[in-house]
Image (spheres, grey):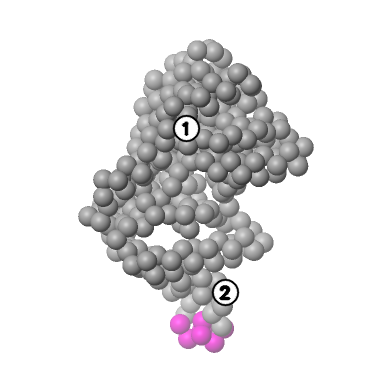
Amino acid sequence: MKVNALRPALVVVTGAGSGIGRATAIRFAKSDAHVIVSDLDLDAALATTAMIRAQGHTASASRLDVTKSDEWETFARDVLADHGVADVLVNNAGMLVGGAFLDLTPADWDRQLSVNLMGVVHGCRVFGSQMIERGQGGHIVNIASAAAFTPTPVMSAYSVSKAGVKMLTECLRLEFGPKGIGVSAICPGVINTNIGQNSITVGVDSDLVEHGKEISKQIQEFAERLPFAPMSPDLVARAAVRAVRFDLAVVPVRTEAWLGYFMLRIAPGINRRIAQPFSIESMEKMGTRVLNRLASPTSKPEAERTGLPIGSSR
């Protein structure tokens, strides 16, 4: 770890129309950087830009489909022409394709990898080349996931895409580092975003999928009402800023991410066994139980009968 002399004046964030991308854009803007807010949904990008400007900072919005290399080329050229070379690129745009491996088609894999992995590849290539050509340093932050090192039986495509992002990051640190460009992978655990509601689930009854998305939405709404923020996207945004400041290689976010990161290194067999029992149905049932427990904490008599702390989950 080292203190990076880079003081970002221009930051590009993809998928910044909501969730982690929006929180990251806002946090970099607070440090007086001009932020280019990009998203597939231009209206969402404009909304994030309006939030930043309302706080007295500066930002610009742009539509970007991260799966298209030609759009990346045009986008990078426009940023260069209008604002100069970006000091920081945050590759955040992502999505989730879930389902058992044998239910996934080649098209499902293409969809997952084109966004989560190739979108990052395109961004690193076009903005990395600009940073290197300028010769004044820079930093690339790739938002990966704890899924990069914590396998699950119904998220093979997603986990592979995020493991690819992590490995790409570590490879580029070796290539770009001597040229003054830092590259970091942020690996969040469970974060309160819309990724579950916007996910594509293959090979599962549609009613079960909708039920799972509704549970995800209710848990998200409940978390937003809490006086503290245990799953806030801002946790990831702060990690991104910290990764740039100290030129960190891999930054897990939240306890479960750190646990998976260390277990992969010291006890990979245990890491796999922990994930083995999970399926789409079991995770949705668990979500229902957690939501019910949060909404209706265990009464004292029941807690005394079960020996559980009041409000704890079984």
Real-space CA distance between mark 1 and mark 2, rounded to the nearest whole angstrom: 38 Å
The circle on residue 210 is none
Q: Residue at x 48, y 86 (%)?
A: 305
Q: Nearer the viewer, residue 79 or 270?
A: 79
Residue 130 on image: x %, y %: 51, 18
Residue 255 on image: x %, y %: 48, 52
Determine whether, in the image, residue 225 is placed left or right of residue 210: right
Q: Which residue is mark 2?
A: 295
- Give amino acid for label 2: Ala
Q: Nearer the viewer, residue 309 or 189?
A: 189
User: Is the residue marked by circle 2 packed among few (<14), some (14-19), or many (20+) residues within 10 Å?
Assistant: few
Q: Residue at x 42, y 32 (%)?
A: 68
Q: Nearer the viewer, residue 41 or 243?
A: 41
**Marks 1,2: beta carbons within 8 A:** no
Q: Which residues are magenta?
A: 300-306
Queried whether the magenta region covers residue 118, the answer comes back as no
Q: Which residue is mark 1?
A: 184
Q: Residue at x 59, y 65 (%)?
A: 222
Mark toward the start of the polypeptide (1 vs 2):
1
| Element marked by disc 2 | helix
Residue 121 on image: x %, y %: 40, 30
Determine whether, in the image, residue 217 is placed left or right of residue 47: left
Asked whether the viewer can see residue 104, the reply is yes
